[in-house]
Image (cartoon, coloured by chain):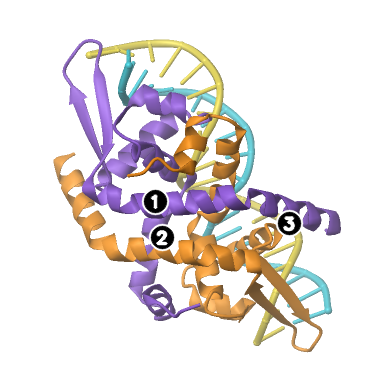
Chain colours: A orange, B purple, C yellow, D cyan
Amino acid sequence: MVANRVSEVLSARDSAACRVREILDRVGDKWSLTVVGELGRGSRRFTELKNVIPGISQRMLTATLRGLERDGLVNRTVHPVVPPRVDYELTPLGLTLLDTAWALMNWALDHIEEVDQARIAYDKAG
Amino acid sequence: MVANRVSEVLSARDSAACRVREILDRVGDKWSLTVVGELGRGSRRFTELKNVIPGISQRMLTATLRGLERDGLVNRTVHPVVPPRVDYELTPLGLTLLDTAWALMNWALDHIEEVDQARIAYDKAG
DNA sequence: CTGGATCCTGGGGGATACTG
DNA sequence: CAGTATCCCCCAGGATCCAG
């Protein structure tokens, strides 16, 4: 439990902490993390992403991709062909997020059971 | 760019992927990550958290702590004294999230500038 | 058939006031 | 001090339609 840079910056209560939270808000939501994780496996088309991410609506996929593109994490490439083809891939900046994104998803994967148990116990006690 | 367990599970399109996203939704939002990060530095009282996390409302702090408690990440201890005193601390499960949470926050901290530049460029081009 | 824009509703989330 | 209750607004996000 080292006191690292994050905790120092956070405890400073300055605007940097606010900015970090702003970035987290963009990059920490489930769809962004999922999309980044999927694109980490390679370039994908819009429909491929939609098919591979069950439960996401077109609207949310579009919005998520736009946000990631705006933040410089994803490149959008339109191929002028018929039928239209749009490829999405991680930028170098996006690649730097990949390990962390996967780490968080791995954590979730590893602890689903424990979280479930905790919820059951909490709801029973409640 | 290794193909790890997460990408395998995600590509399997089974319910596990959905559950992972559910957990991410709870644990990946900015307030939960921020609270976990702060509690990683040690036990905190309600008001201490509120003071140290600028911008959070009582309502959101309460809701965030409740959610983390329900998921077994945070312990809530009420001391029967006047005035009342309530301490929050990470559970062992919560501690397992700490490194990853800090990693994500460190990533945000390290890449604020790049994200800002990307946004400016994107908005200018748009 | 692909990707994007529009419409509309539920609930996330802030501000404020009140309680044990 | 540590919440709960209430009001209210805004937008996340699903359903649907549009363009090429």
- Which residue does the image show at 70% across and 70% down from the upper left? A75
At label 2, the amino acid type is Leu
Q: Nearer the viewer, mark 3 or mark 1?
A: 3
Q: Viewed as shown, does residue B11 lie left or right of B113?
A: left
Q: CA distance from mark 3 to mark 1?
A: 27 Å
The secondary element bearing badge 1 is classed as: helix
**Percent x, y for residue A99?**
48, 66
**Percent x, y for residue B41?**
35, 37
For the residues labelled 3 and 1, say whether their Cβ atoms are less than 8 Å apart.
no
Local crowd size for mark 2, using a 10 Å CA cut-off: few (<14), some (14–19), many (≥20) = many
Which label is found at residue A104?
A: 2
Considering only order in the chain, which callout, 1 or 3, is on the residue closer to the N terminus? 1
Q: Viewed as shown, does residue A118 lie left or right of A9?
A: left
For the residues labelled 3 and 2, say whether their Cβ atoms are less than 8 Å apart.
no
The secondary element bearing badge 3 is classed as: helix
Q: Nearer the viewer, mark 2 or mark 1?
A: 2
The secondary element bearing badge 2 is classed as: helix
- Which quadrant would the C terminus of chain A be assigned to in this image? top left
Q: Chain of mark 2?
A: A
Q: Which residue was labeled with disc 1?
A: B27
In the displayed structure, B114 sits above or below B41; it is below
**Percent x, y for residue A88?**
66, 75
Q: Is residue A56 visible?
A: no
Q: CA distance from mark 2 to mark 1?
A: 9 Å
Q: Which residue was labeled with disc 3?
A: B118
